[in-house]
Each structure stands twice: as structure tokens, then as C-alpha cells.
Image (cartoon, rainbow, N blue to C red):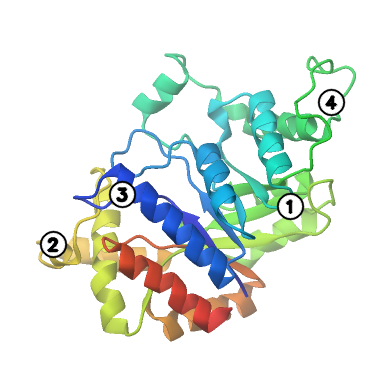
Amino acid sequence: MKLSVLDQTPTPNGQTSQETLQHTIELAKVVDDLGYNRIWYSEHHGSPNLASASPEIMISHIASTTKRIRVGSGGIMLMHYSPLKMAEVFKTLSTLHPGRIDFGVGRAPGGDRFSTLALHEGRHPNVLNSYDKLMETMMFMTETMPEDHVYSRTLAAPVGAPLPEVWLLGSSGSSAAQAGRFGIGYSFAQFISGDLSSSMLDAYRKNFTPSEFMEKPQINVGYFAMAAETEEEAEYHAASLDLNLLFLDKGMPFQILTPEEALNYSYTEIDKMQIENNRKRFLVGSAKQVAHTLREHEEKFGISEAMIGTISHSHEARVQSYQLLAKELL
């Protein structure tokens, strides 16, 4: 199984954004050396505890400081941007780092309504044209805009650039078939919904049509995960994300407290039930236990790449989790 990384650049309570981004660079170098397949950066707006609002800038820097790992967006929230600009950005990145750039696209806003309004300069965005914008972006990238299209006389520079891989991100399965028809990769966010199913992935494979971006279907599945030497140690560090997810379920701000603070939090019985339910999205245990679950999913769903997002208060525990999983699976 291939292993990859989703880095949401979490900023634990008490840590500065500068420290977070330095840790981001350190982690990228570690997983590059370990043999991870790709690393993606998310796009979040308006959050003091998530430092990546501009994945395209993160990609440029990380690709320059690593050797072989693919680097991409997980994802660009295309509703905020023009297809021409995104095509130019990722053609430039792919020219600078040929064969290493991924253009992962999400259809969500990546922030609250206030951030979305600001990104659109006070106008309400049209969220119904996400697939049209993605198709236009890909036509700009391949320089195949139809002659009767309003943009037919516009080229996205640099001309003749090597193409990035293009991926569509989804969390409900509704976009799986569309990703197949576009001939691009499909990334399912198990860490959001916890509802991975064979029928969803089969819909992608059944509808897949080869394109200039991909000859064969590619799927990866994103998981929250915390692995450690022992199950007890993993549970200790996982307490921070358990509480964070509970806060988000209650509409509270994203924040990453220490494991001690999380373990001493006053949970109601309903809170405990919600945390248990959220564990469908979150793999926690010794590295052998987590690896066993991933191998089970590989066999059951036919997936060959797991994209791991590890959020903890301790940077050292986070790095160790990726190291231990690499030892078990790579």
C-alpha cells in the first residue's frame, strides 16, 4: 500500500504560526525520506489554528525543499478562483517541478460564511458551477479550449507545460462518478464522513475515461490517524483530536489542547457517544493495529493508497506516527 500525507498545518494551542510552518517543512522532509508517495496541503480560511490558507504557496516551497515526493493541494477550493488563474499557477508549478505536482480540487468553501464573503468581495458565490470551473481549468491546462468558447483566444501560460495530476476531492461519494468521467483521480475524505463504501469507489472506476491527466483510475482515501508504539500511548495523544472534533460538532472554534487538558475535560454521556461515533473517521492504536485496519480496507475496498492526516498537540508524536506507519507499510 502507498502512504501519503494530508497536512492541514494544525497550530496547537500555545504554538505560533511560524512554529507551525517550520514543523510543516520538517515533516515534509521526513516523509520524503521515508518513501511516502505524496503530501497535500489543505485550504482553510479564517481559522487561527490552521495555518494553510494558500496551498499553492506551500506547494512551491515544499517542492523546493524535498527531493522526490509528489506535492499538491488537498485541496484548492475552486469556487473562489478563476479557472485561468488556477491553470496558470499549477502549470507554473508543474514546469518548475515536472512529474511532482498534484492539483487537488475541493468544492467546499474551506471557511465560514464571513471568510467566503470576503473572498468574493462581498458578493455571494455561485457554488453550482464547480464542475464547469474544473473542466475549464483542465482545458486551459491542456490548451484545448473549444473554438466556440468565450475563452478560446486566451492561453494559460506557461504554454506547453507538463501537466500536473488532477484530483477531485469528495466526502459524500456524490462526486465519484464525475471524477471518473473527467478522467482524473478521486480522493475520498473518510476523515470527514466515515462512510467509505465499495459502491462509491466502483462508481468512479466504472465511469473512468482515460484523459491527458490520467491513463488509469487512481483512488486515495484520507484518514485521521494516530499511531504510536503502544495503543495506550496512541490513545493519550488522540485525546486532543477527539476533543477538537467534539468542539467542531458543537460549532465551537477549532483548537488543539494538550492531551492532559483533553483527558481532564468534563464530558457528558452524549459527548462520549459522539467521540465514539467520530472514531469511524479516526484510526487510533499501535502502528501494527492501524496498519492492520488499513490492510483490511485495502482488501475490502480495493484501495491502494492511504492519505494520512495526523493532528496532535505534540509535533514529536505526530512525526513518530508517520515514521511508525512507514515502518509497517512501506
Q: At x 57% / y 42%, what residue is drawn? A: 60
Q: Residue 105, located in which quarter of the rendered image?
A: top right
Observer-side mark, 3 or 2, equals: 3
Please state which amino acid type lies under the numbered disc 2.
Glu
For residue 261, which numbered disc appears in the image?
2
Query: Horizontally, is 110 left or right of 218 in the view?
Result: left
Residue beneath label 1, please?
99
Residue at disc 3, secondary structure: helix
Observer-side mark, 1 or 4, equals: 1
Residue at disc 4, secondary structure: loop
Residue beneath label 3, please?
19
Tell which circle, 1 or 2, labels the residue nearer the N-terminal end.
1
At label 1, counting other C-alpha atoms closer than 10 Å, the crowd grade (few under 14, some 14-19, many 20 or more) is some
Q: Residue 48, located in which quarter of the rendered image?
A: top left
Please state which amino acid type lies under the numbered disc 4.
Met
Between the residue at mark 3 and the residue at mark 4, the CA separation in whole angstroms equals 43 Å
Please state which amino acid type lies under the numbered disc 3.
Glu
Query: Are circles 3 and 4 on residues that touch, CB within 8 Å?
Result: no
Q: At x 64% / y 31%, what residue is drawn? A: 86
